[in-house]
Amino acid sequence: MAKQIKMVLIDLSGTLHIDNTVIPGAVEALNRLRSANIPLKFVTNTTKESGNFLHKRLIKLGFNIKKDEIFSSLAAARNLIISRQLNPMLLIDPAANEDFEDLIKSNEKTNAVVVGLAPDKFHYEELTKAFRLLLDGASLIAIHKARYYKRSDGLALGPGAFITGLEYSANVKAEVVGKPTEEFFKAALGDVPPKESVMIGDDVKDDIAGAQAIGIKGLLVQTGKYRNGDEDTITPRPTKVCSSFVQAVEYILNKEV
């Protein structure tokens, strides 16, 4: 029963909304889940916008979400940069810059390349600049390596293809800080045991396989980037495949997961 669940991790883009369009019934379903008094954490790999911008957009879409409930790969990357005293070149969307502005030291050597989703920066000259820094010894940090994501007009390339290209050309290996890393999920859970937690998401690899690898139950929703047959591409299969976030909430509230 839901009483056995001590934390529900919820993906955002593709699970609750797609760009500025809410998944039908998601606002109401989230309110129902809150009524069960289960702690919630919204875990996201989005790098298209800063934490402040993301929170304001979710509120505008009608979701009852507190800013401190959002755990993002941007925050994980920021913590990593601070802990290692890095001075990074940022390949991220301008809307996310405010999360890093105070960390850039213009008078010091750039010693890291940090890559998120940055469509306007994934061009030859900018990638060549990053490549040269890597050849000079800079670290390559991937905020995440998503293969693709869902936009309002269909699937679009994620940063994974560009990160892999930099890895290949510079003969380096990127350090990934967001989903599906074990460290990301453990940080999101805090002291909550994985076996007493559930992850709801649309990405079978980053959301579901990543969560299940440390013992979190995975509910895969067939919205967002979901493609037919995704559930058959991971082992073990998702705990449950749900038509949408609405059905996932019903499953948590009415089934033993």
Image (spheres, rainbow, N blue to C red):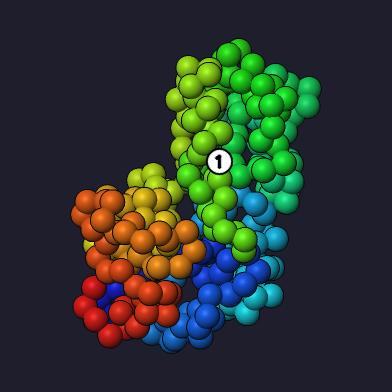
In this orientation, does residue 160 appear? yes
> In the rendered image of this protein, does residue 196 appear above or below residue 97?
below
Q: Is residue 11 above or below residue 169?
A: below
Q: Callout 1: 10 Å neighbours few (<14), some, many (20+)?
A: many
Name the residue: 46% across, 83% down.
29
Within the image, what quadrant is residue 256 found in? Answer: bottom left
Q: Is residue 155 left or right of residue 34?
A: right
Figure check: 168 above or below 227: above
Q: Taking the image as drawn, is residue 183 in sight?
A: no
Q: Is residue 71 left or right of residue 218?
A: right
Q: Secondary structure at mark 1?
A: loop
Res. 154 image quadrant:
bottom right
Identity of the residue drawn at 69% across and 22% down: 129
Residue nearest the viewer, comparing 86 with 72: 72
Q: Which residue is mark 1?
A: 159
As displayed, is residue 75 above or below residue 17? Answer: above
Classify residue 67 by image quadrant.
Answer: bottom right
Q: Position of residue 174 (x, y in %)?
A: 48, 29
Q: Position of residue 60 (x, y in %)?
A: 69, 75
Query: Foreground: 111 or 162?
Result: 162
Please tell me which residue is depicted at 33% across the width and 57% down the height of the picture: 230
Choose between 79 and 110: the one closer to the eye.
110
Q: How many marks?
A: 1
Q: Amino acid at mark 1?
A: Pro
